Amino acid sequence: MQSDFLDASERHWQDAEQLFQSQRWANADHFFGMAAECGLKKLMLAFGMPFDENRDKPQESADSKHADGIWIRYETYRSGHHQGAAYGLELANPFTDWHVAQRYATQACFNQARVEPHREGAKRVRQLLRNAQLDGLYDYL
């Protein structure tokens, strides 16, 4: 299957929101992180991230990170692109306490207070994606 970071980001966001509204904190948290990761990777592509089409993944291993690590990588690409100034995250990395392996953790480890910052981070990425679409940034792919 071919990667579609934009579609994946939107799909994960929608699922996360439904789970959040149902107070299913653990899975909502996981999907907010995945939504942010995929959204940032879509933007990174627009800002010049090398992508290996044959292997269907970023060429650089540092770009194959999850939400907790991709925030910094995004800034590397954004700051080096002539249109990047308009796409700052304007938040400290809200995913420093998020890890993809948390999908194995017990539900008792999650609550609304833990999930809310991750939701806000994913929401910010989603807004950047909308802005990029309106600005025609995806034409650079």
Image (cartoon, grey):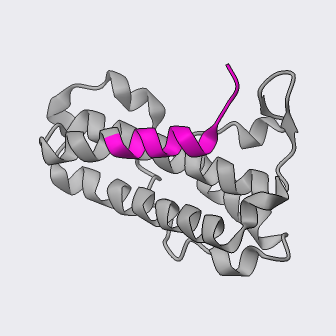
User: Looking at this view, is 125 or 139 the one in front?
Assistant: 139
Percent x, y for residue 82?
A: 85, 76
Expressed as whole percent of the image width and height from the top left, the position of residue 78 reads 74, 67
Which one is in front, 131 or 83? 131
- Residue 97 location, x and y as percent? 41, 49
Kindly indicate the quadrant of the structure image that contains residue 81.
bottom right
Q: As displayed, is residue 77 above or below residue 29?
A: below
Is 18 located above or below residue 77 in the figure?
above
- Residue under the image location 36 percent in, 63 percent down: 120
Residue at image point 46% right, 66% down: 124
Q: Position of residue 28 (x, y in %)?
A: 28, 40
Task: Specify the quadrant that holds the N terminus.
Answer: top right
11 inside magenta stretch: yes
Q: Is residue 68 visible?
A: no
Number of marks present in the image shown: 0
In the rendered structure, the answer to whether residue 90 lies left or right of residue 141 reads left
Position of 101 with respect to 133 (left or right) is: left
Residue bounds of the magenta highlight: 1-14
Of 36 and 75, nearer the camera is 36
Residue situated furthest bottom in the rendering:
85
Residue occupying the point 64% across, 73% down: 87
Q: Main secondary structure of the magenta part?
A: helix
Instruction: Examine the structure image and report whether residue 32 is included in the region drawn in magenta.
Output: no
Image point 43% across, 39% down: which residue? 11
Query: Taking 27 as reference, is 72 above or below it?
Result: below
The answer to whether residue 89 shows anywhere in this view is: yes
